[in-house]
Image (spheres, helix red, strand yellow):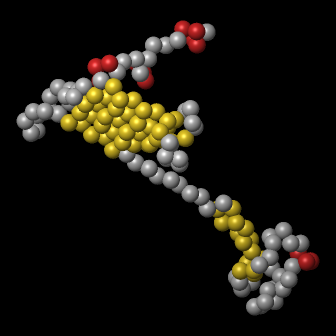
């Protein structure tokens, strides 16, 4: 947001006057009588920050990490090219229970835009593992 401000050029009092007012049409400052002016622009913006969490669980002795994790999960914002905005994503890969679950939700409406719950062993050909369509390469 951009906001223009006008002050008296002599005493600094903020004035309720448009910056585009011609010099000969300016009203005198109520405090000092000057028609000199200082102009300023105030620019404000908003930054939204979001965060997520990722976790892995492994079996074994404390301090010794080995092999693949038996549980991987994430809960974080994920960019949707389809909807052109950030979505809430929850994904769990549970090797012990052979389960893959994923839920993508629109944070504005609460609508679930994608949901998957299937055996992890059958979860193939998604994301970067998808087969490329030869017709799109031309």
The answer to whether 88 is drawn above or below residue 37 in the figure is: above
Q: Position of residue 33 (x, y in %)?
A: 81, 89
The answer to whether 76 is drawn above or below residue 118 in the figure is: below
Which residue is at the front of the view, 42 or 97? 97
Which residue is at the front of the view, 12 or 98? 98
> Residue at image x 31%, y 34%?
92
Say left or right for 117 vs 50. left
Quadrant where the C terminus lies?
A: top right
> Residue at image x 72%, y 72%?
5
Q: Position of residue 68 (x, y in %)?
A: 20, 26
Name of the residue lying farthest toward the right: 24
Say left or right for 51 vs 100. right
Quadrant where the N terminus lies?
A: bottom right
In this rendering, the count of numbered labels is: 0
Q: Position of residue 27 (x, y in %)?
A: 85, 83
Which residue is at the front of the view, 14 or 116? 116
Quadrant assignment, res 74: top left
> Residue at image x 13%, y 33%?
59
Camera sees residue 102? yes
Q: Position of residue 58 (x, y in %)?
A: 17, 33
> Residue at image x 59%, y 58%?
45
Quadrant assignment, res 66: top left
The answer to whether 88 is drawn above or below residue 101 in the figure is: below
Which residue is at the front of the view, 46 or 81? 81
Say left or right for 57 vs 90. left
Camera sees residue 9? no
């Amino acid at each position: 947001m951009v906001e223009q401000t006008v002050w008296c050029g002599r005493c600094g009092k903020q004035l309720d006057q448009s910056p585009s007012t011609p010099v000969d049409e300016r009203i005198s400052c109520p405090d000092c009588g000057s028609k000199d002016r200082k102009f300023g622009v105030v620019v404000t913006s908003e930054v939204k920050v979001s965060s997520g969490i990722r976790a892995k669980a492994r079996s074994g002795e404390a301090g010794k990490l080995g092999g693949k994790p038996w549980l991987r999960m994430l809960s974080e914002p994920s960019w949707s090219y389809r909807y052109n905005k950030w979505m809430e994503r929850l994904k769990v890969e549970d090797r012990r229970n052979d389960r893959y679950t994923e839920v993508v939700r629109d944070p504005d409406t609460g609508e679930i835009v994608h949901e998957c719950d299937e055996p992890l062993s059958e979860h193939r050909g998604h994301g970067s593992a998808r087969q490329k369509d030869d017709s799109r390469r031309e």
